[in-house]
Image (spheres, rainbow, N blue to C red):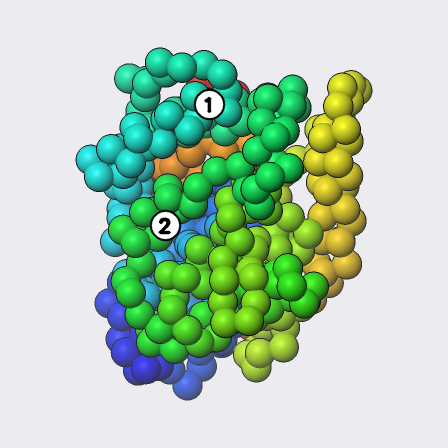
Amino acid sequence: MNAMLTDHRSEAFGKGAMADGDQRSAVVALGGGGARGLSHLGVMEAIGESGVRTERIVGVSIGSLMGGLVAVDPDIKRVQAKAIGLLNSPVFYEKCQRLMGAAAKVSARAGDSIPDSGLGEWLMQWYARIGRAMRHGQRLTKMLRSPSILSNEILHEAIEKLVPDIDLRETAIPISIVAADLRSGHRIVLEKGPLRKAILASTAIPGFFPPVAWENALLTDIGVLDAIPLSIARAYPADMTIGVDVGSTVQRIDTFGTAIDVVMRMEEIGERLYRRTTLPHADILIRPDVGHRPWYDFTNPEALINAGLVAARTSLSHACSQGKHLCIPTLIQPSSYQSTKASHE
């Protein structure tokens, strides 16, 4: 297994990679953050360039999906193209058209259609309307009578298109996926079982998407509380632990019109406070400049990937200069992805 990964890296990243005997290993913790998690794919590209061997990936929420992609296929360029292509694929487009009915009910705006600007823009507008609907209580009855507002159809479709139907133990790079068990109240680390189902459970945002039954457990996304699984990653043997933080930038909020506004704000505060306690577990912390992006904004995924690439190259180079004994090859020219902001930002 390791020989296969080493052969791939030497071919993909060329000069500058370490010899097998000198290679440093890392467990990489990929955090949650919705669309911002696309930057994980740029981070993994930079880690590959550096010659550091990824011993294991530990993912939560969107980090489990992006981590699953990389764990299955170490060809990072192919993985990036696959993720970007999904957003505009005909099959996924059709699914979102059907899902528009559910969005219209939530937002009380029937007759909406996917805009000419693309599926990513539609997803962004849709999630924004869901947020407004929740704040105004338009689906309060649904929330009180059901464990989720939405079906997980769109999540299921995306995972099926991106990830093969294999066991967690069959990936090229070992992966652990973290979720919360609603029944026991414990954090759960999945190392065996269906990869697709594990990702579905870890990305099931509480209240928005239904929890996933797993043996005697009922699993949901733990990223709303424990957004970077660094304590789990630290427990695995490796030369270093690398954490990737794609959390949001704190924004001041002056008005709280409903109880839901207050609850959601406290969840945000709690997650950020808990995150501070986990960051010391990282030997290297990478923070792509994506905190300004809403978690539902999937527009311009190339810019998100590039932000991860730039941030990881900078952090890894700094780690090398601080004597962490990383082999940083002569970095290639900046990616052809242009880090242009979406027009609404």
Observer-nearest residue: 58 or 101? 101
Residue 204 visible:
yes
Observer-nearest residue: 299 or 323? 299
Residue at the left extreme, as displayed: 90
Q: Is residue 120 above or below residue 343?
A: below
Q: Is residue 188 above or below residue 301?
A: below
Amino acid identity at mark 2: His
Residue 309, image x and y in percent? 44, 48
Residue drawn 57% across and 81% down?
237
Which badge, 2 or 1, is on the more N-terminal residue?
1
Q: Is residue 56 above or below residue 339?
A: below
Instruction: Name the element at disc 2.
Output: helix
Residue 166, image x and y in percent? 31, 70
Query: Label 2 to label 1, Cα distance in Å?
Result: 21 Å
Residue 317 visible:
no
Callout 1 crowding tier (Cα within 10 Å): few <14, some 14–19, many ≥20: some
Residue drawn 65% across and 23% down?
137
Residue drawn 40% across and 15% down?
110
Q: Where residue 105 is drawn, which disc sits there? A: 1
Residue 5, image x and y in percent? 32, 74
Residue drawn 58% across and 45% down?
147
Instruction: Name the element at disc 1.
Output: helix
Query: How many discs appear?
Result: 2
Observer-nearest residue: 300 or 200? 200
Which dot, 2 or 1, sits closer to the camera? 1
Q: Quadrant of residue 60?
A: bottom right
Residue annotated with mark 2: 156
Residue 219 vs residue 186: left or right?
Answer: left
Residue 304 vs residue 31: left or right?
Answer: left
Amino acid identity at mark 1: Lys
